[in-house]
Image (cartoon, rainbow, N blue to C red):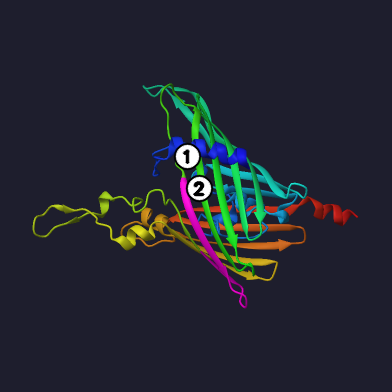
Amino acid sequence: MKKFLFLTYLFAAKLAWSQIGGMGTYQFLQVPTNARINALGGNAISTPDADINLVSINPSLLNEKNHKQIGANFINYFSDIKAGELNVGYHSDSLKTTFAAGIQYMNYGNFIKTAPDGQVLGTFNAGEYNYHISAAKRYHQLSYGATIKFINSNLETYHSFGLAADIAANWRSQDELILLTAVIGNIGTQISTYTQQNYENIPYNVQIGFSKKFAHNPFRFGVIAHNLQSPGKLLYQISNRQYTSLETGLPIEEDFTLVQKAMSHLIFNTELLLGKSIQIRFGYNALRNRELSLNNIRGMNGFSWGVGLKLNRFHFAYGYGGFIPGRNTNSFSLITRIQDFKRANN
């Protein structure tokens, strides 16, 4: 853990000025492939559960219940873009530490390669990969963890390698009904660039989250504040939303209120836990709703939902993410535990 934190400190010192909104590289790190995360608005850092796939956004959620768990994820993204992730966990009683390892990928598909005059020269493909290892410990009601990411990006003949880290901590009430968590994600740097002397930042994300499960009903409610490294700076003016002044005839640019700026940082989600076998999930991402709204067209952009179903030794999940009308995502996840099969054979 000391090595993780030391590396993270070095990255943070170098990249404290990183920004979001397309101002950096390795943007595929921002795309969750997990069905549960997508169903909860694209972020679930405050969701306490025995779900190995949550390590991809909050390593401090790792615990002994993730021992020998395997999680597979797939998302059918836009166009013919495919993405997925595979995670496996292991708990060491002697070290009192839970470990996880995994791989995240995004395949952008095949492209036609042409010359400036339009002559077809062949085809090429593009893909990006994130190989990550994590560790977490628990001390009474406090848990803390870290993830190291080894990033490989291949875009036609352009290649880049990067290194990044997540650090996180959470606190749970004694009755396990309240969770408070903080995560700094994707603190990193490019080791090798696509072209010489063209360094690009890796956008990091400062987040805090809260969740509350009620003792006598099946609901868990959560709220997450993200991108706190850029307070009030997530919104931007959209040209086709300008209005014309009746007095001057000149366009009037959008002006954002304090409430709008604050809302752009928030994600709300809830889970309906029907016993140990069925979960129904809903989420609302205010920034996604704002960025992807169309004039005079109301859709499900910003809203998401999903279900989880446990059958025997398998836990299936489906997540639906609303973006713009006719452009939505479907994600699927599967979790199982190796030792469950050994018990069945015995």
Q: Which residue is at a point 68% across and 50% down the rendered structure image?
A: 71
Above or below 305: residue 14: above
Q: Which residue is at a point 63% across and 51% down the rendered structure image?
A: 53
Residue 107 showing in the rendered view = no
Q: Please tell me whether mark 2 sits on a helix, a strand or a loop.
A: strand
- Amino acid on which the number 2 mark rests in the picture: Ile
Please identify, in this view, whether the residue under mark 2 or under mark 1 is nearer the observer.
Answer: 1
Residue 238 tag number = none
Q: Position of residue 87 (x, y in %)?
A: 67, 46
Q: Sequence-wise, which precedes: disc 2 or disc 1?
A: 1
The stretch in magenta equals: 205-222
- Amino acid on which the number 1 mark rests in the picture: Ala
Question: Which residue is tagged 2?
Answer: 184
Marks 2 & 1, CB-CB < 8 Å contact? yes
**Residue 197 magenta-drawn?**
no
Depth check: give the residue in front, 66 or 5.
Answer: 5
Q: Position of residue 184 (x, y in %)?
A: 50, 47
Above or below 111: residue 334: below
Q: Position of residue 135 (x, y in %)?
A: 65, 45
Q: Quadrant of the N terminus?
A: top right
Question: 311 left or right of 304?
Answer: right
Q: Which residue is at a point 8% across and 59% down the rendered structure image?
A: 247
Seen from this angle, which residue lies furthest left?
Answer: 247
Question: 238 left or right of 104?
Answer: left
Q: Quadrant of the C terminus?
A: bottom right
Question: Which residue is tagged 1?
Answer: 12
Seen from this angle, which residue lies furthest right?
Answer: 346
